[in-house]
Amino acid sequence: MGPQMRIAWLFLIAAIVTEVAGLTAMKAMTVSGGYIGYIIMYAAIALSYYFLAKAVESISVGVAYAVWEGSGVTLITLVSVLVFGHHLTGREMLGIALAVAGIICVNAGEVHDEEHHAGEAQ
């Protein structure tokens, strides 16, 4: 994995972190009755989309979106459980497990440019 791809993955991680932070701030502020959480959420989500756009310059859109969405949902659920005391049902746990399995399958099936070009040369 070259430096450009590493930077793209860092952008994708930043997109996930800002999405989770924004939605967590919104939930925390709405529970306490404030509106500032919405402002933080909108700014964080906008920043998350910016980071996602930077990531897809090097990572395929399907892989980037799957990782962003699946990781985001999983981490937001984890925050909901740990911070806000939400109790997961069996179906919710199954859904998260399937999302993680899907992310793994999408990443495992991705064909990298180097591998693709090496296969064409043969």
Image (cartoon, rainbow, N blue to C red):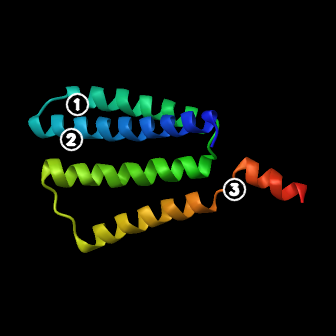
Report, in whole angstroms, how far the alpha carbon at label 1 lies from the one at label 2.
7 Å
Q: What residue type is labelled 2?
A: Lys
Residue visible at 61% across and 46% down? Answer: 61
* Residue 116 locus on image (x, y percent): 78, 54
**The image quarter in which residue 111 lies:** bottom right
Q: Work out whether 94 lies above or below 99.
A: below
Residue at mark 2: 27
Q: Position of residue 7 (x, y in %)?
A: 55, 33
Q: Where is residue 32 in the image (x, y as percent from the top left)?
A: 10, 36
Q: What residue appears at the point 34 percent right and 55 percent down from the top-left corner?
A: 74
For residue 93, above or below residue 54: below
Please state, as top left, top right, bottom left or bottom right, where the N terminus lies in the image. Answer: top right
> Of the numbered discs in the image, which one, if any, rests on residue 76?
none
Tell me, yes or no, whether the two marked residues, 3 and 1, touch with CB atoms within 8 Å. Answer: no
Q: Which mark is residue 111?
A: 3
Helix, strand or loop at label 3? It is loop
Circle 2 residues within 10 Å: few <14, some 14–19, many ≥20: some
Say whether residue 122 is left or right of residue 5: right
Depth-wise, is mark 2 or mark 3 nearer the camera? 3
Marks 1 and 2: CB-CB under 8 Å?
A: yes
- Callout 3, which amino acid? Val
Mark 3, residues whose alpha carbon is within 10 Å: few (<14), some, or many (≥20)?
few
3D distance between C-alphas at marks 2 and 3? 38 Å
* Image spot of residue 93 (x, y percent): 29, 68
Which disc number belongs to residue 37? 1
Q: Quadrant of residue 27?
A: top left
| Quadrant placement of the C terminus | bottom right
Q: Which of marks 2 and 3 is nearer the N terminus?
A: 2
